Structures are given as structure tokens and as C-alpha cells.
């Protein structure tokens, strides 16, 4: 079945450092791809998405590009802030069902 | 407007007991989903409702788990004869309608602990 594998954490960074979280997927079709974020004490929120190959999703300074040739959807941010500390989940969606990766915990130090 | 709400936020029960977890979706959302998030893992799909009917319950782990949505709005996830392995955060999500382009909005979850 469809699945997502993402980089294991935890990841600890200093403020203004670059962040990359790797995500690869396995799917029989052409799913939509997502990054969700869970801030401390809050529920899951959609961060960005891409619905077809070569699409780039972006939000809050984060970007990810849907790469069909490498079946990847890596999350990147050029300069992180303390407020970016959270758990990040890569996910794919085939029709209505979301399949999530295990999550990557990111801590940004001032 | 109000988001997805779930009650209770925390539930502690003893092995063998019955529990009910409630989800109030965003008003007007016809599609509703339940997911389960075990410690250190991402959410896993349990069941999807379109209106009042369960369109896909393939993620329910066994027949101790059951969910209803009798009026097409509020949903209740029911777990019989709870086991310690059922301990997890149970997440509910809703979307305006079903379909790949529809964003799913998640509630804060119910943390279930089975002692």
C-alpha cells in the first residue's frame, strides 16, 4: 500500500540555520503530497501541499517540491526561528485517505 | 468560526472497560475522518464517513472498534473491552466534502490511556 518515509529526528538547530527534512513516498498512483505541523500543545495543521509532479508548495517560509522521478517531497526552510519548533509530518493522500510518516521533531534554539 | 472539537481531551480507563470518544466537526462539513496516533508515530487512518454512512472502515483494527455518525454531524468512536495497546491519541478531522483537493481540518485529539 501507499506509504511515506521521513527523516528521523530529533533535529536541533540554532536560530537562522537552514532546515531540511527528507521525505520519500511509495504509491501506486499519483497522490497529493502534504506537510503537516504540530506545534506544542496544538493540533495538526496543514503547512503546505502539492497536488502534481513539479508543483512547489510554500508557506511561512517553508517550501517543498513534488519530485516524481525521485518520489520525494523534502521540506526546506532557509532561516528557522524559535517559533518553528514543532513536530513535522509528511503525508500523502490518495483520494480521501491520508497516510503519514512517523514525524520529525525539530527544536530551534535561540 | 469554531474548528473541530473533541471530547474528552483525556480519558483514563481500565483494561476491559468500554469508552466513547466524541467528535464535533466544523459546521457544514459532510466528510469526517478518524485517525489514531500512537506514541512516536504518525496518525493512522481508521474510518471515513460521508454523511451518515461509513464509506470506508478498513482502518479499524478489529471488531472492538466501532464508530457512528447518526445525523451526519457529530461522530462517536466506541471501543469495547479496551486493551493496553489501545492507548493512543485519537484524532478526528473533517472536510467540506470528500475528494482529494479538500483540506482535512484536525481536532486537538483525545488522549486515551488504558491502565
Image (cartoon, grey):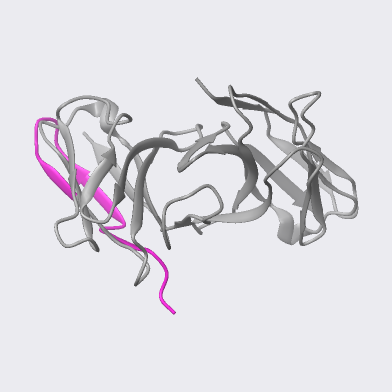
- Figure quadrant of the N terminus of chain B: bottom left
Q: Quadrant of residue B88?
A: top left
Instruction: Tell me if residue A39 can be seen.
Output: no
* Residue found at x 35% / y 70%: B28
Of the pair A100 and A82, the residue shown nearer to us: A100
Task: Report whether B113 appears left or right of B105.
Answer: left
**Is residue B15 highlighted in magenta?**
yes
Tell me where residue B14 appears, x and y as whole percent.
14, 36
**Is residue A90 highlighted in magenta?**
no
Q: Quadrant of residue A91?
A: top right
* Residue found at x 48% / y 55%: B104
What is the span of residues highlighted in magenta in the rendered image? B1-20
Instruction: Tell me if residue A73 can be seen.
Output: yes
* Residue found at x 77% / y 29%: A68
Tell me where residue B79 appears, x and y as whole percent.
16, 38
Q: How many marks?
A: 0
Amino acid at each position: 500500500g501507499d506509504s511515506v518515509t521521513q527523516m528521523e529526528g530529533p533535529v536541533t538547530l540554532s536560530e537562522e540555520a537552514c532546515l531540511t527534512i527528507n521525505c520519500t513516498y511509495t504509491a501506486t498512483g499519483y497522490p497529493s503530497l502534504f506537510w503537516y505541523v504540530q506545534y506544542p500543545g496544538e493540533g495538526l495543521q496543514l503547512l503546505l501541499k502539492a497536488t502534481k509532479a513539479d508543483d512547489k508548495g510554500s508557506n511561512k517560509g517553508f517550501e517543498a517540491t513534488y519530485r516524481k522521478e525521485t518520489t520525494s517531497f523534502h521540506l526546506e526552510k532557509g532561516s528557522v526561528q524559535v517559533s518553528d519548533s514543532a513536530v513535522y509530518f509528511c503525508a500523502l493522500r490518495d483520494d480521501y485517505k491520508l497516510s503519514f510518516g512517523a514525524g520529525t521533531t525539530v527544536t530551534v534554539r535561540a | 468560526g469554531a474548528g473541530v472539537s473533541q471530547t474528552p481531551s483525556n480519558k483514563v480507563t481500565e483494561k476491559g472497560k468500554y469508552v466513547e470518544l466524541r467528535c464535533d466537526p466544523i459546521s457544514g462539513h459532510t466528510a469526517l475522518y478518524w485517525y489514531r496516533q500512537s506514541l512516536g508515530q504518525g496518525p493512522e487512518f481508521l474510518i471515513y464517513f460521508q454523511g451518515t454512512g461509513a464509506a470506508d472502515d478498513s482502518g479499524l483494527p478489529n471488531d472492538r472498534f466501532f464508530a457512528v455518525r447518526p445525523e451526519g454531524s457529530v461522530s462517536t468512536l466506541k471501543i469495547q473491552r479496551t486493551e493496553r495497546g489501545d492507548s493512543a491519541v485519537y484524532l478526528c478531522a473533517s472536510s467540506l466534502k470528500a475528494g482529494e483537493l479538500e483540506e482535512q481540518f484536525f481536532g486537538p485529539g483525545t488522549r486515551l490511556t488504558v491502565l
